[in-house]
Image: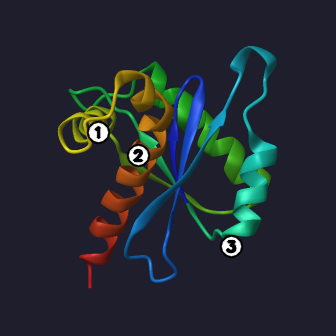
Amino acid sequence: MGLDVGSKTVGIAVSDPFGWTAQGVEIIRIDEANEEFGFDRLGELVKEYKVTKFVVGLPKNMNNTIGPRAEASMAYAEQIKELFGLPVEFQDERLTTVQAERMLVEQADVSRSKRKKVIDKLAAVMILQNYLDRTSSKF
């Protein structure tokens, strides 16, 4: 399961059973102020899709350092690792949201309001697909 962890939402993607392609599932709303991180819904999806691993996007700074947003993603990853007892791997996600937005504008001509509703899910797809491509090339 691929996760694009933001400050207000978490984009969710899953792979096919063979681990070849990533598909977007949904976007879970989170509310950091009230400590509501969508873990209940995430747990439902973990069961539904028989998830065996999380791939969390790591939004490093362009100079490859870890900033506040990456630290927040790492903290979220640690929480889901403890909650679900599943391994977590990180995938560098620099520019995935930019790529996702460009794809929606150039290829699908999606309006700004509609882009906001799907951008995190598409970013999660790109994070997971990049991970799948990177790990499958080892064979």
Give coordinates of residue 96: x percent, y percent. 30, 40
Query: Earlier along the polypeptide chain: callout 3 or callout 1?
Result: 3
Q: Name the residue that disc number 1 marks.
A: 104
What residue is drawn where x is 38% and y is 33%?
Answer: 59
Give the alpha-carbon distance from disc 2 to disc 3, as whole Å: 21 Å
Viewer-proximal residue, 67 or 124?
A: 124
Whether residue 75 is situated above or below residue 132 in the rendered picture: above
Give the alpha-carbon distance from disc 2 to disc 1, as whole Å: 9 Å
Give coordinates of residue 52: x percent, y percent. 63, 71
Give coordinates of residue 125: x percent, y percent. 41, 53
Query: Earlier along the polypeptide chain: callout 2 or callout 3?
Result: 3
Circle 2 crowding by C-alpha within 10 Å: few under 14, some 14–19, many from 20: many
On the image, which quarter does residue 138 sit in? bottom left
Which quadrant: the N terminus?
bottom right
Q: Name the residue that disc number 2 marks.
A: 122
Would you say the residues marked 2 and 1 are in contact, meaning their CB atoms lie under 8 Å apart?
yes
Give the alpha-carbon distance from disc 3 to disc 1, as whole Å: 29 Å
- Residue 48 falls left or right of residue 128: right
Q: Which type of secondary structure does the marked residue at label 1 adopt?
A: helix
What residue is drawn where x is 45% and y is 83%?
Answer: 18
Query: Earlier along the polypeptide chain: callout 2 or callout 1?
Result: 1
What residue is drawn where x is 58% and y is 38%?
Answer: 10
Q: Tell me how the rendering is colored.
A: rainbow
Give coordinates of residue 85: x percent, y percent. 74, 61
Which quadrant: the C terminus?
bottom left
Q: Amino acid at mark 3?
A: Lys
What residue is drawn where x is 31% and y is 76%?
Answer: 136
Q: What mark, if any, has residue 50 been given in the picture?
A: 3
Circle 3 crowding by C-alpha within 10 Å: few under 14, some 14–19, many from 20: few
Q: What mark, if any, has residue 19 been given in the picture?
A: none
